[in-house]
Image (cartoon, rainbow, N blue to C red):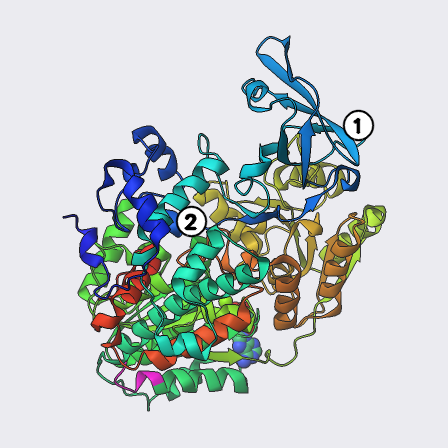
Amino acid sequence: MTRRTAKRPAVRVRWELEEYTLIKSRMKGGETMDLFSSVTELRGIGPTRAKQLQRLHIETLYDLIAFFPRAYEDRTKISSIAGLEPGIPACFEAMVISNPQLSRIRKGMELVKVRVADETGRVDLVFFNQPYVKDQLVYGESYRFYGALRDGFGCQMQNPAFERADAAGAVTGRILPIYPLTAGVSNKLLGACVRQALASCAEDLPDILPASVQQQYGLCPARFAYETVHLPSSFDDLQKARRRLVFEEFFVFSAGLAAIRTQREALHTKAMDTQHMEPFYRLLPFRLTNAQQAAIDDILRDLSSCRPMNRLVQGDVGSGKTMVAAAACFCAIQNGHQAAFMAPTEILAEQHAQSLSRLFSPLGIHVTLLTGSMTAAQKRAAKSAIASGAAQLIIGTHALFTRELQFHDLALVVCDEQHRFGVAQRAALSAKGNTPHLLVMSATPIPRTLALIAYGDLDVSVISELPPGRLPVETFLIGEDKRKRLNTFIDKQCDAGHQVYIVCPAVEQSELEDLKSAEGWAQALGQAVFPHRRVGLLHGKMKQADKDAALGAFSRGETDILVATTVVEVGVDVPNATLMVIENADRFGLSQLHQLRGRVGRGSAQSYCILVSSNRNEQTRKRLKALCATTDGFQIAEEDLALRGPGDFLGQRQHGLPLFKVADLQMDMQTLMEAKQAAGAAMTGPETLELAAYAPLRARVDALFRQSDLALN
Ligand code: ADP
Ligand code: MG
């Protein structure tokens, strides 16, 4: 028996369906298969096909059954030939009225031509490279076809699908699922495999939802759902099936989160003393805003409890999150522990190290930086200070959490701007050392519903106000025709002693696209437009040392204009910069533009953001205008979600976030809320998932979270 068999559900539900038994008996060898049998058990699947299917992550029969179509073609309605519309595929029934002719038009290209007709008209069919069609279509016989008339070619149709009229039902007269494909695997083959898999073990499909949940939320049974997505008999049924599968996905996810939470709540740590924060407050050069103080109070309450903190501090760019984190670090250090501060980039890690060691130096707190670009000797020194406990506040990138790095007594981990740092990584972190307290900080105002997914395992504090005296950044959208005026404006800012960012969408010039590149534009500006200014360059492909030098020079005021890519997006803090110019602004998401804009307006001088775009598309201009009209990050986030979908927030690769196969994060939010509620009610304690009745659910939770290397244990 294989290891996977062990995961089979304890309780099996049996359905008695003759046709299944029939098909099953016809299957290869007739041996019994189960959900975890290899696809090679299926008729027509040998090692080569199995390899091809593997590219679609299909190895077992269950993988096949859970491989969902990406779309459906409605082939239910039968049209007459006269009713066909050019370019729109449809089904029709017709008789072959000419003998099919096979010809070779050029080397390797074979053509079958045949004419078909019904009472309303005739169509000339052309089949490319399907010589066998000549023998399949017989003069005088009737067939059902599915295809579209060629636009502008009268009554001609290329490569329609067809079947005998008296045996219709496979390719016509039904809703046809369209699967994602890979080389060598056709839609037909995949559909046939899925049907075989369903026939042989749909009855074994575990129902992972408690019966009460199914009833309360009006969901169809699991088996109906899986059969219907692959073999839909109507769009109504499909809708029901889809709702069930989306609900399942969210339920699995929510149950996993609930399990993480309850596991964590069962953990104990030593409570910190949080009564002696005065020395920290005295260090600050400004008064904390009420929102900052409230967030700090939330954090201190967590630290003084006996449970590990898991808190997200969400606040717009410039709201002063660093000081909130610093307060938490101070508390941990004062209690004799170490705190680690993780930044998304080395640049930012260095900036934090600089400003925090300056802040903490009056108290003699030892701040240590650890980044990949330090010399081996520097790293060795840092590591030994971290291991001995001499280093009290450790700042670095995610490299801080490689296995071999030993902390002396790590009690607090701060993740700055890590919105792509998912549930799984967070759980891995809590496993480091003595379950340290965790503080996540994000400036990405993420829509509430998406936050549920990205941060569903965290408590949230929102910093809803900016420090006083900040002037909102004035934002303008301009076209190429205003280039001269823009250059004058840039010059004026420099004259006033301020600095300017210019962000380009590309690093290097490309022949394919007419986009401003950081390299090309920096050179052009430096030589031709602003020879009297110091122009710097910063992009992700530069060597680390060069990046550091470029950013260092800009933050010390040694360059006037920094031409950069979006590497400046996150966290960089140069208060003297008052102008942000974004070239080809239509290329960016609203939230990203908002993030970039947050690099200015950090001091007391009036700041500006100029979006340059000559894109005339109405939708695009609407998007960019929305950014000019508001500086409220949350409002922008909602707008962005509506216009561009969730990809921008969760990242293209959704680092550490579960991938949903059916659910659409935008469309299915209502279902997410319901599933979350249902899962919360079902998961009454840490042991719920251990119950035998929940074994199938547990297996799904494990599988979902395993994508990101998280095991629940
Ligand atoms: P965030 O990380 O939230 O984008 P930062 O922590 O970098 O913001 O803070 C932005 C700037 O505001 C920094 O220069 C910081 O020193 C300053 N700052 C933070 N809190 C306050 C405050 N309460 N009053 C005035 N300035 C503040
Ligand atoms: Mg910050």
Asked whether mark 1 and ligand 1 are closer than 8 Å, the reply comes as no
Where on the picture, by quarter, is residue 643?
A: bottom right
Q: Amino acid at mark 1?
A: Phe
Q: Which residue is mark 2?
A: 67
Q: Toward the viewer: 691 or 412? A: 691
Q: Which residues are magenta?
A: 302-307
Callout 1: 10 Å neighbours few (<14), some, many (20+)?
few
Residue 168 seen in this snapshot: yes
Estimate the x, y position of residue 547 in percent, counting from the top left. 49, 46
Q: Amino acid at mark 2?
A: Phe
Tell me whether the residue at label 2 lies in contact with that at label 1, contact meaning CB atoms closer than 8 angstroms.
no
Where on the picture, by quarter, is residue 682?
A: bottom left
Q: Quadrant location of the C terminus?
A: bottom left
**Helix, strand, or loop for circle 1?**
loop
- Seen at 21% across and 83% down, the residue is 270
Question: Predominant secondary structure in magenta?
Answer: loop
- Seen at 59% across and 80% down, the residue is 465
Q: Toward the viewer: 405 or 226? A: 226
Estimate the x, y position of residue 515 in percent, counting from the top left. 68, 40
Residue 353 in magenta stretch: no
> Distance from label 2 to label 1 (Cα)?
38 Å
Residue that lies at the very extreme toward the left in this rendered image: 1
Q: Quadrant of ligand 1?
A: bottom right
Tell which circle, 2 or 1, labels the residue nearer the N-terminal end: 2
Where on the picture, by quarter, is residue 628?
A: bottom right
Tag count:
2
Tag of residue 153: 1
Q: Toward the viewer: 224 or 349? A: 224
